[in-house]
Every structure is written in C-alpha cells, then in structure tokens.
Image (cartoon, rainbow, N blue to C red):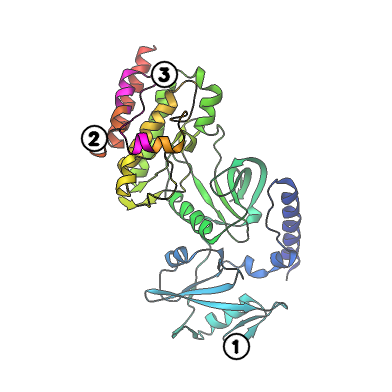
Amino acid sequence: MSRAFRDAIKTEVKKRSRRQRHTSDTLSTISTEEVYREEYNLDYWHGFIPNEDTALILKDDGDFLVRSLMNADKSICISVREGEKVYNAIVNRSDAGVYELAGVEYNSIKELVDELQVRKRPVQIEDTMVVLNRPVPRKSWELKHCMVSLKKRLGKGSYGSVYKGVLKKDHQQIDVAVKLLTHMSPENSLALWKEARVMMMYDHPNVVRMYGVANDLEPFYLVMELVSGGALNDYLKKRGKNATPRRRTQILYEAALGIEYLHTKGCIHRDIAARNLLLDKVVKVADFGLTRKSKSYKVNPDKPMNLRWLAPDVYHTGIVEKHTDVYAFGVTMWEVFQIPYQIPYKEWDADEVYNRVVEGTYRLSPPEGMPPEISGLMKECLATPELRPTFKSIVLYLKACTNQTMEETR
C-alpha cells in the first residue's frame, strides 16, 4: 500500500469521525479496517449497486465489474455478462484479508482480477464458464463518500435526513443537497436507486438536477442540486400572504414547465404537491421517490398513498397515468392560492377525505382571490380523467395568463 494511499485513507477516517460528531443522526460506523480495503480504490469497483443497474452497465460479453451485494454479509461479488445473463461470483474474504474464489487464494481483489483477466482464465459460475474481458469503470454519477462533505442538516426526506453539503468533483466545489440514508432496508436501497436512476435522465431548469450516488460505503448519499429557497409549501406558510396573483401564477407556470418536461420523457411523477416543488430563481420539481418511466402503471389502492392529492379514479382503477399528475396539479393550484396556506381538506381526517372525495363527488373550490382564468383551469384539472387537460395545454394557457398579467401591471 503506497504512502499516498495511506495518507488519503487517514484523512478519510478523520473526516468521517468529524462528520459523525457533527450530524444528529446515528450513522453507520465505518471501521478503519473497512476503509483501508484497497478494492475501494479500483476503477472497476462499483460499491453497492443493485442487480438491475449492474445489468444496465454490463453490455457486452466479458464486461465485468466488482461490487458489494446488499445482503447481511455485504459480500464481494464479481459480476460478468455472458450472453443475455449477468453471472455473479461471490468472493470470500477471510479475517486476515485473503480473498478466495473457486478454491484459489489471492492477496487482493486486484491480484484476483489480474489473474483472471490478463491470463484469460475461465471461471465457472453456476453451470457456465465465463471469461473476464473488459473491466467497466465507475460511471460519473457513481460518487465516493470522500467527495462529499456534510455541513448543515436541512430536514428529513422520504428515506432519511437531508443535509446541505459540498461536492468536490472535476476541480470544482459545488453546493449540494445530500439525502443521507442511515437505516437502509433492501426495499429502501432499491427505492433509492430507482429514484436516482429516474433523476439522472433529466436536464431541465425546472427539474432538480441529480449529481449522483455515493455508494462505495454505507450510509448511501443521494447527491443533488441544492435549491436555496426551500419547499414551496414552507414559502407559502411564511411569506405567502405577500405574494401577488402574478407571482402565484408564475410559480404554477414554472412548475408546469417541469412536469411537462417529465411527461415528454415518458415519466409520471405521481407525487405533485407544493411540498415537492422547490424555490430558487425558478420553481423546480423535486422528490422522485414515486416516479415511474411508463405511459401507465398499476398500484395497489389498498396501500397508503398521498390521499389528499391523488386522483380519486386511481383508487377505483389501480392505474396511474399522466392525467393523474394533472389532478394533483389542480390540488397544488389550490395550495398556491389558498391564503393563509393550509393543506387541502384541513378540517377532515383521512377517512372523511376518502368518503367525500374518493367515494363521493366533492372537489376543492377555488380559493378567494384566485383569478377567474386560473380557477377555470383548476376545475378542469380536477375533472374526470377524460376531461383533464394535458400539461402541454396547461403550459400554453399559464404562459398566456402570465403574459396577460404582466401587461395589466405595466
């Protein structure tokens, strides 16, 4: 082990120790021995990455990578593609740091891989002989923990705490928001990767940008754009009374631009609400934990869902489509114009909301002060699925409304 590598490791250990003292969450303990393991420094080491993403990364026969499995033992695994299948070979590691595969011992993962790849020595996995041909390096979005510094806790998200942090990448220091996942069940791990996979497809000024996932060690970090203004619902609670109708309409227009972009990418957000819209210089759509890349998909209506925003028809059909987002946007329009801010159906508990909205025909009425042209659009969004507008038409309509409002205020 080189001196430079040892110095880097010592710095990382000290950094993690400071980070654990700084945060209020109980973080997973990362031992010195674990951090010293040199496989973490290999280009083809992908850390904790699920099977689905492994299959997407390995494209050609002989493509391989090394990763940790998301099991209780955190087993080291060599994954290699052969034909239509990705084969996984478990590498045993002794307490003494000796690695063993197929009865042969090695001093390091690098030594093991070099033996198999350079000499083209086939290894049997299941009932198939495979050859390691091309190591696939980490993608640009596969970050390392040493690249991320946590600064200030901002709040709690769907799967853990959210921190303000700094990402050091490509000789830059970037202010970021970091979702830190402290207690990762297999289900939460897959949910994290699904959210990251969805977000990495997007590049739009009204959609929160994803920088990557720090997955070399636990706890995992989901690293994304820092939006300084915070959530829209918090803004409406604290400063909403001073927002003009023009400002509120502009907020809805910018949110609609982001959602329209998602729909053009074939994605349904399924959790549109003021709490999932962030404010910066422009509004940005965030929180993709429920997002799916699909024209439509089935959900279980018996499982808890965002009742106050979810279209009633979903509870009857179990099917989510783009017009599901349109209904939720209609509820969000109500949130944006409600003064003082409050959640929809504030006076009702969940059972009453279900009985009167899902089983009944009750719909939100436009708040006092909502311009007639906006209230008309809100009613259309809350209509039955076949009568709801598309986001393309919503964007065009709101753009016309904002232009008209600007003309009237000159």
Please state which of residues 110 and 239 is positioned toward the viewer in this rendering. Answer: 239
Q: Amino acid at mark 2?
A: Leu
Magenta-colored stretch includes residue 367: yes
Say if residue 110 shows up in the picture.
yes
Please state which of residues 335 and 276 is positioned toward the viewer in this rendering. Answer: 335
At label 1, counting other C-alpha atoms closer than 10 Å, the crowd grade (few under 14, some 14-19, many 20 or more) is few
Q: Which residue corresponds to mark 3?
A: 245
Tag 2 near tag 3, CB within 8 Å:
no
- Going from N to C along the chain, the mark reached first, 2 or 3, is 3
Q: Which residue corresponds to mark 2?
A: 387
SS for callout 2: helix
- Location of the N terminus by quadrant is bottom right
For the view shown, which residue lies furthest in the left direction?
A: 386
Image quarter of residue 311? top left
Separation (CA) of disc 1 from disc 2: 66 Å
Q: Amino acid at mark 3?
A: Pro
Q: Which of the numbered marks, if any, corresponds to residue 103?
A: 1
Q: Amino acid at mark 1?
A: Gly
- Going from N to C along the chain, the mark reached first, 1 or 2, is 1
| Residue shown at 44% from the left, 30% from the top | 344
Between disc 2 and disc 3, the foreground one is: 2
Separation (CA) of disc 2 from disc 3: 26 Å
Image quarter of residue 203? top left
Separation (CA) of disc 3 from disc 1: 72 Å
| Residue shown at 36% from the left, 48% from the top | 267
Q: Which residues are magenta?
A: 355-378
Say if residue 308 shows up in the picture.
no
